[in-house]
Image (tube, rainbow, N blue to C red):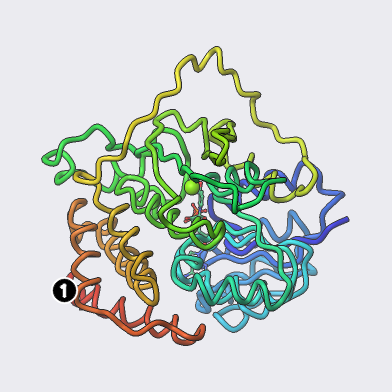
Amino acid sequence: MRSISILGATGSIGASTLDLIRREKDQWRVVALTANSNAAELAKLAREFSAEIAIVADEAQLPALRDALGGSQVETGGGLVALNEAAARPADITIAAIVGCAGLAPTMAAIENGGTIGLANKESLVSAGEVLMASVVKHGATLLPVDSEHNAIFQCLAGNKLSQVRWITLTASGGPFRDWTHEQLALATPAQAVKHPNWDMGAKISVDSATMFNKGLELIEAYHLFPVGLDKIRIIVHPQSIVHSMVEYRDGSTLAQLGPSDMRVPIASTLAWPLRMDTPCEPLDLAAIGTLTFRAPDEDRFPATKLARQAAEAGGATPAVLNAANEIAVAAFLAGHTGFTRIAAHVETVLTRYTPPPPASLDDVYAVDAEARVHARALLELV
Ligand code: NAD
Ligand code: MG
């Protein structure tokens, strides 16, 4: 029996994780399940999985959560302090699946426990890369990448040395607009952006996939997880999302990981690591798929990957500013306050206007993140 906490249990990654746990319930003990504000859904999950504790980050939802869990054994809590305390409860594995930099503090709390962290919440690694990785080392935690590309790379690196790597190649679906013209992109709506052709995901990452910021964030994520140097990490567009990423070695061998476009595969690989577990996913039928295609990314129509690479090169606080500005711009786009192509333009402007010194601590990262959001909101005239 292993214990598990899921931060962001009501989201897309949370649901996929719980779907796998549900199939072998007798092997898991659920410690903490958390959500932002959906108390009803969280309560339902907490009851189903007999969680030790359920937390809503939005404290105003705590009475609703308490009501919904009345008569059960599940402890409840609300607000950020309660969220961090729950994340700090010992668990064999914690799935960090909150969206955005909001996941940073609870993810850090879990890391400080020294257990195993399945990291889906890429924004925390983008914003606090050095600080987070240093904490992993300091507390002897094991960081396993859930993001499909990084999970693929992790698998392709098994048994090999980073020093032998020639290239790490991140594959990108290119998102729903990969063949759209500049003119079409300028008119793209939120409903169109969240309809991803291959993956069923939360709204924020779906918009990120459409702008290619998702791949930009993943470039920075890969840079921290697999320290081969930025110049050895590249991106290729692969519309079928079957090859999840690749590692080429100095001898010319390229190892790739293939699988269906279903996050339960990388999540299962994380949950069972270093073993394997069953998933309900259909076996890969390459004969039916027939063709796998690859092409270079178009950074003219999708400048996000270029901005992310520049931010990673600049280092220090720049990736945290990029991430915060993007989070604000994506929320503004989803709310109908700004256009699709304005997202990258907006991030670029915030990056030129706000250039804080490198963060030395977690508190510095939070301060940079908060201040970047103020700049980003002001620029969008949201304040
Ligand atoms: P989602 O929007 O479906 O779910 C997000 C979860 O975080 C929900 O449980 C929500 O209640 C919680 N949450 C949101 N804001 C919060 C806040 N301020 N405080 C506390 N909790 C909050 O998102 P998702 O698609 O599951 O993505 C989660 C993370 O995993 C993201 O970082 C995303 O980039 C990453 N990821 C997702 C996928 C995918 O297929 N969905 C793939 C790779 C990586
Ligand atoms: Mg990914």
SS category of the residue bearing label 1? loop
Q: Based on the displayed image, in which of its 4 quarters is residue 317 positioned?
A: bottom left
| Residue sitting at the far front | 251
Q: Residue at x 27, y 63 (%)?
A: 329
Rendered view: 268 above or below 326:
above
Relative to 342, is 99 on the left or the right?
Answer: right
Tell me if mark 1 has few (under 14), some (14-19) or many (20+) residues whose alpha carbon lies within 10 angstroms of its own: few
Q: Position of residue 10 (x, y in %)?
A: 57, 56
Q: Classify residue 142 by image quadrant.
A: bottom right
The number of numbered discs placed on residues in the rendered structure image is 1
| Residue 41 visible in this rendered orientation of the protein | no
Above or below: residue 239 compared with residue 71: above
Identify which residue is drawn at 46% across, 64% down: 123
Q: Is residue 129 left or right of residue 63?
A: left
Q: Position of residue 154 (x, y in %)?
A: 62, 48
Q: Quadrant of residue 345?
A: bottom left
Q: The C terminus appears in which quarter of the rendering?
A: bottom left
Residue type, numbered disc 1: Glu
**Residue 265, percent across and down?**
64, 39
**Percent position of residue 273, x then y:** 75, 49
Q: Which residue is mark 1?
A: 381
State left or right for residue 262 relative to residue 198: right
Q: Mark 1: is the Cβ under 8 angstroms from ligand 1?
A: no
Looking at this view, name the residue that lies furthest to the left: 183
In the figure, is residue 311 to the left or right of 76? left
* Residue depicted at 68% across the width and 46% down the height: 160
Quadrant containing the N terminus is bottom right
User: Is residue 264 in view from this perspective?
Assistant: yes
